[in-house]
Amino acid sequence: MPKTKTIKKIAVLTSGGDSPGMNAAIRAVTRKAIVNGMEVVGVQKGYQGLLEEEFIDFSMRSVSDTIQRGGTILRTARSEEFKSDEGKKKAAEICREYKIDAVVVIGGDGSYKGALGLSHEGIAVMGLPGTIDLDIACTDYTIGFDTAVNTALEAIDKIRDTSTSHERCSIVEVMGRNAGYIALWCGVASGAEDILIPEKYTYDEQDIINHIIESRKIGKTHHLIINAEGIGHSTSMARRIEAATGMETRATILGYMQRGGSPTCKDRYYASIMGAMASDLLYEGKINRVIGYRNGEFTDFDIDEALSMTKSISEYQYDIARVLAH
Ligand code: F6P
């Protein structure tokens, strides 16, 4: 393993789903590393690009005009080959061949698992939390979540206007295959009557139907349901709800429009600080860490420890959502 101040060349890649703010992170990693005297290569298309040696030598100017852009300038991929032991061995050999001492991985916890595997093959790694889903246990913030929820909320507000005007029920499906953070935040912030998230949903549609009937009785003119992608089936759910309640019900699936787009100020700021920290930690010889934001501070954790942590949706916050939508 490299010792203190022996990391001379780093690679940076984005992996898994893209998220707004990834470019700000790439820019910060690159510029801080160069200022620290390190060489930087950008790896295109995540771990797959690493296996295919898709490297670009980065200078200060390589990351110009990127901070405001959504997506990832490095592109991203999900690599089956890298998941295997042979894949990780091959990636480590390629790093040694190119004299890459450390790889900075911007992605979700699946990408962190890949990074941990690479560290076991003798390549130093550093993780940055890049996912719109907020589902990385060691951190209260992930790069892209803020933009995603604000993009989704803007759309939900518009749907709500139409829903109210026509006295309809609207089901809006937001992203989050395994995690309900986007749905919870958008649900609370839009005043949704029901929020369906994979962590809590009981699959009892009658409960929703009863809620709609009760709400109508107390004078509510519309009913907004935020449904997480992990539960899905919004269109057929709308048909069943309409049949059972008599209330006209429409489903809207927001999809990828909430994953792209120009990052918010918060996502640019946090990604910039985290990216710079990643390069500074490597410069100081601190390796196999992941950066997080916890209790109001930017911090770092051992990658192994970070992957063993768990986090869950707060019962209180979930329960209060329904009370506030009365
Ligand atoms: O980036 C996170 C996410 O949007 C999840 O909410 C979703 O489960 C997943 O990515 C879907 O990604 P893709 O459609 O690219 O496989």
Image: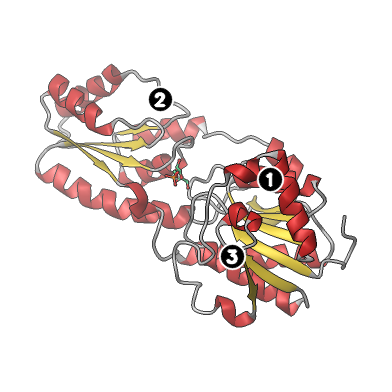
SS state under label 1: helix
Residue tagged 2: 201
Compute the Cα span from label 1 to label 3.
Answer: 26 Å
Task: Name the residue at the right extreme.
Answer: 3
> Mark 2 touching mark 1, by CB under 8 A?
no
Q: Residues within 10 Å of mark 1 (few under 14, many from 20)?
A: some
Residue tagged 1: 87
Q: Earlier in the sequence, mark 2 or mark 3?
A: 3
> Mark 1 touching mark 3, by CB under 8 A?
no
Q: Residue at x 74, y 58 (%)?
A: 94
Q: Residues within 10 Å of mark 3 (few under 14, many from 20)?
A: many
| Residue 134: image location, x then y, percent | 52, 46
Q: Amino acid at mark 2?
A: Tyr
Q: Earlier in the sequence, mark 2 or mark 1?
A: 1
Q: Amino acid at mark 1?
A: Gly
Residue tagged 3: 25
Q: Residues within 10 Å of mark 2 (few under 14, many from 20)?
A: some
Compute the Cα span from label 2 to label 3.
Answer: 34 Å
Vertical arrangement, residue 104 with respect to residue 252, above or below: below
